[in-house]
Image (cartoon, helix red, strand yellow):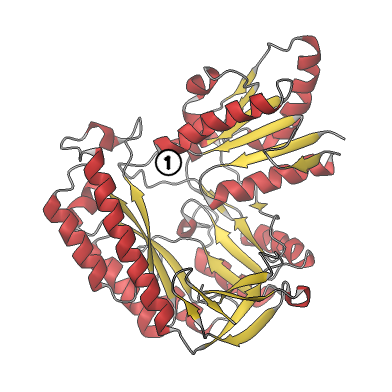
């Protein structure tokens, strides 16, 4: 039996796509193994958001080549789409597939097997114009037996000044509600209890099909058996009060929101070409809190963007500190990306200052998360227990995304249990039952 191994970098969308591709190999007689093990095929699904992600890609290629010099190494995804010429320079790569072609990975691997038998030096690179792609391949992750990430939308029409994603992923497109419902039924039949809806700009769902993301939410809530849904991330200008009202009374959509902020001043937001201002962001956060005071609300923030002065960074920290309902931050240090507008902007922030600002916001995030956990102490919440045994403990998350653990008991795996949140471990930041 041939063996295939995947290494995935970047967003949850990539993980969903890797999982879907891996299923194709398994259905065709392959055994999926860990990327650190000996394999016949190594697949690296790449990210282009930061320079660090690109460096990790190169390291993964070298690791695979060292594990098995005779293996086929395929590099796919965003970095492959944008910089195939750089990947070509790394010894050992056999196939490079951009986002427009990666869904045909198994087909290309089978072709490469035939080629390798004749000429092991031959390579096959497939980089098509991503802007011509109009369809979407629905993908979902399957590694976790309790939950999965389901891709319902891909691409982006926003072209923010710092971002390469529209160039790597193409224009916004999405599945139909009917197609999503069909895949959700398959996921439900596999026994999973929770689905995280994901996409590049998920709030754009359906705009080319005459449908809306809100209509998808209502259909999933009404027409499926899945007990829990989360929205991975949604732009503040696309998250409406109507959606928030719906989540507050929904059967299955959980009080958990992830909303990009990116900058805490209108000057920087405008330079980033974002489609909202700080007032709109604050209004959305406060409205969620007014409807669901127990909701977990996370925000993405980019620090050290071009032109961000000390004063503007202080305004950002003041704005974030002033948003009491915010529960956590995902902090990203700005990284120059080729072909973006911002790479030509003046007044770049020194890298060392970017790192210092990142540490400051990470501390603010920790404080907010601790405060949120403390506020939920002694409350009753429903936990979905995971199946892994971690040193005699099993873990799970509440509906509002609080981590909980208790002594391992396989009978509780993939079960939802209502518990009282006591015994907060402030160092590891979880409740222990």
Going by the image, does 86 lie left or right of 396? left
Q: Label 1: how many residues lie within 10 Å, few (<14), some (14-19) or many (20+)?
A: many
Q: Does residue 389 appear in the picture of this structure?
A: yes
Q: Is residue 139 or residue 346 the one in the foreground?
A: 346
Q: Is residue 85 above or below residue 3?
A: above
Which residue occupies 59% across, 70% down? 229
Residue 39 on image: x %, y %: 75, 32
Q: Is residue 380 or residue 232 the one in the foreground?
A: 380
Q: Is residue 119 or residue 267 the one in the foreground?
A: 119
Mark 1 residue element = loop
Q: Is residue 290 or residue 244 the one in the foreground?
A: 290
**Residue linked to disc 1:** 49
Q: Quadrant of residue 418?
A: bottom right
Quarter the N terminus occupies: top right
Q: Quadrant of residue 295?
A: bottom left
Which residue occupies 70% across, 21% down? 69
Going by the image, does 261 lie left or right of 68? left
Q: Does residue 97 appear in the picture of this structure?
A: no
Q: Furthest-left residue in view? A: 311
Q: Is residue 352 above or below residue 362?
A: above
Quarter the C terminus occupies: bottom right
Residue 401 on image: x %, y %: 51, 72
């Amino acid at each position: 039996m041939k063996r295939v191994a995947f290494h995935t970098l970047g967003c949850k969308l990539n993980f969903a796509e890797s999982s879907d591709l891996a299923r194709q190999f398994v259905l065709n007689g392959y055994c999926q193994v860990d990327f650190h093990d000996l394999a016949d095929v190594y697949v690296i699904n790449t990210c282009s958001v930061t320079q660090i992600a690109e460096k990790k890609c190169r390291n993964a290629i070298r690791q695979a080549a060292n594990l098995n010099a005779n293996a086929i190494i395929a590099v796919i995804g965003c970095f492959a789409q944008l910089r195939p010429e750089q990947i070509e320079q790394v010894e050992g790569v056999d196939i490079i597939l951009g986002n427009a072609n990666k869904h045909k990975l198994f087909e290309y691997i089978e072709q490469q097997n035939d080629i390798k038998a004749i000429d092991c030096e031959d390579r096959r690179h497939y980089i098509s114009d991503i802007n011509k792609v109009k369809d979407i391949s629905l993908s979902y992750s399957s590694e976790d037996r309790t939950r999965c990430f389901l891709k319902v939308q891909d691409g982006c029409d926003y072209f923010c000044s710092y971002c390469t994603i529209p160039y790597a992923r193409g224009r916004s497109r999405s599945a139909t509600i009917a197609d999503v419902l069909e895949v959700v039924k398959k996921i439900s039949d596999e026994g999973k209890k929770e689905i995280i809806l994901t996409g590049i700009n998920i709030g754009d769902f359906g705009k080319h099909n005459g449908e809306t993301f809100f209509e998808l939410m209502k259909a999933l809530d009404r027409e499926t058996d899945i007990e829990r849904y989360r929205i991975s991330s949604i732009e503040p200008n696309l998250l409406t009060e109507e959606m928030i009202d719906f989540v507050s009374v929904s059967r299955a959509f959980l009080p958990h929101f992830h909303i990009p902020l990116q900058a805490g001043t209108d000057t920087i937001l405008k330079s980033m070409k974002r489609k909202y201002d700080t007032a709109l962001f604050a209004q959305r956060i406060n409205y969620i809190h007014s409807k669901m005071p127990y909701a977990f609300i996370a925000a993405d923030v980019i620090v050290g963007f071009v032109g961000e002065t000390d004063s503007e960074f202080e305004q950002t920290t003041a704005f974030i500190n002033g948003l009491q309902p915010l529960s956590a931050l995902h902090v990203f240090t700005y990284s120059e990306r080729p072909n973006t507008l911002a790479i030509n902007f003046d007044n770049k922030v020194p890298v060392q200052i970017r790192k210092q600002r990142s540490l400051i916001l990470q501390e603010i995030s920790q404080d907010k998360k601790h405060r949120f956990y403390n506020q939920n102490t002694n409350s009753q919440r429903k936990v979905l227990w995971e199946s892994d045994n971690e040193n005699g403990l099993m873990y799970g998350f509440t509906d509002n995304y609080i981590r909980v653990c208790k002594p391992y008991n396989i009978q509780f795996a993939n079960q939802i249990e209502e518990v009282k949140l006591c015994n907060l471990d402030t160092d590891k930041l979880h409740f222990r039952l």
